[in-house]
């Protein structure tokens, strides 16, 4: 193929998204596919986190309304059940199990201050362990979002550098440096960087948003645990007098 034919071929090159993909070097294609998969995975995590966080907030509000309504804790525990669906109810159930276990052994009605303090301490530890476990469940997938947000631009850049090197080799072989020859190869290479940014930007935004939401929800659980512990300690003090 002479230089005139080469120029006409590149001038008529398909610069659409699919055209750039199919015309790219095999290694660049692999990079693009990885970035597309990372982007799909990122959006799947985003959708899952939106659903979970909204659900936890809604159920926590419902539970708090019931908790602070002034009803019996034992009645609320029986209504909640042994396997609640939301984090705040799970924290409540963990504490009530310790409370009922103590009641079954008569510790809650004991006049000894050291036994009452030990019971409150066990309830606090139980709630703290439960909060830690539930936050780990809610934060599942966050590390992947952070990894996609930090690594994707560099993976895209790797594809771009590789694509530009391949493009320059093709230009050297054709001995034609016209814009019509150079532009398609450069466009194919830069498309990898665009995909890397397209995967990274939503991942970073989502990570920062969900990290803040989960931090506030974790603080909400800890506040509830402290208030519940104070309530139980007050009942123990009143019962021990």
Image (cartoon, helix red, strand yellow):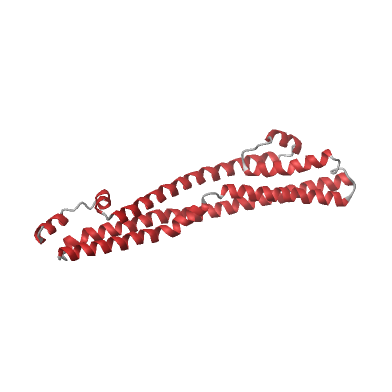
| Residue at x-position 65% and y-position 49% | 131
| Residue at x-position 15% and y-position 53% | 12
Q: Position of residue 150 (x, y in %)?
A: 45, 59
Q: Position of residue 54 (x, y in %)?
A: 54, 44
The answer to whether residue 69 is above or below residue 230 is: above
How many numbered badges does the structure rendering display? 0
Would you say residue 66 is visible in this rendering?
yes
| Residue at x-position 24% and y-position 53% | 23
Looking at the image, residue 139 sits to the left or right of residue 114; the answer is left
Q: Position of residue 32 (x, y in %)?
A: 34, 53
Among the 4 quarters of the image, the one containing residue 158: bottom left
Among the 4 quarters of the image, the one containing residue 25: bottom left
Would you say residue 204 is visible in this rendering?
no
Q: Position of residue 81 (x, y in %)?
A: 68, 34
The answer to whether residue 46 is above or below residue 62 is: below
Looking at the image, residue 174 sits to the left or right of residue 60; the answer is left
| Residue at x-position 87% and y-position 42% | 109
């Amino acid at each position: 193929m002479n230089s005139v034919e080469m120029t006409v071929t590149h001038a008529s090159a398909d610069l659409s998204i699919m055209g750039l993909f199919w015309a790219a070097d095999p290694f660049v294609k692999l990079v693009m596919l990885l970035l597309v998969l990372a982007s799909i995975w990122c959006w799947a995590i985003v959708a899952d986190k939106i659903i979970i966080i909204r659900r936890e907030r809604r159920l926590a509000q419902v539970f708090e309304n019931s908790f602070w309504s002034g009803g019996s804790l034992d009645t609320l525990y029986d209504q909640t059940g042994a396997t609640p669906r939301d984090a705040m109810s799970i924290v409540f159930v963990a504490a009530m199990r310790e409370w009922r276990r103590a009641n079954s052994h008569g510790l809650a009605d004991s006049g000894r201050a050291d036994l009452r303090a030990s019971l409150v301490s066990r309830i606090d530890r139980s709630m703290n362990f439960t909060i830690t476990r539930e936050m780990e469940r809610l934060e599942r997938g966050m590390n992947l979002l952070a990894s996609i947000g930090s690594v994707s631009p560099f993976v895209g850049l790797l594809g771009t550098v590789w694509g530009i090197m391949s493009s320059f080799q093709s230009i050297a072989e054709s001995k034609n440096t016209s814009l019509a020859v150079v532009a398609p190869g450069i466009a194919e290479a830069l498309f990898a960087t665009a995909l890397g940014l397209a995967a990274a930007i939503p991942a970073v935004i989502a990570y920062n948003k969900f990290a803040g939401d989960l931090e506030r929800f974790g603080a909400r659980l800890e506040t509830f645990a402290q208030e519940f512990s104070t309530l139980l300690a007050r009942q123990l003090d009143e019962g021990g007098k």
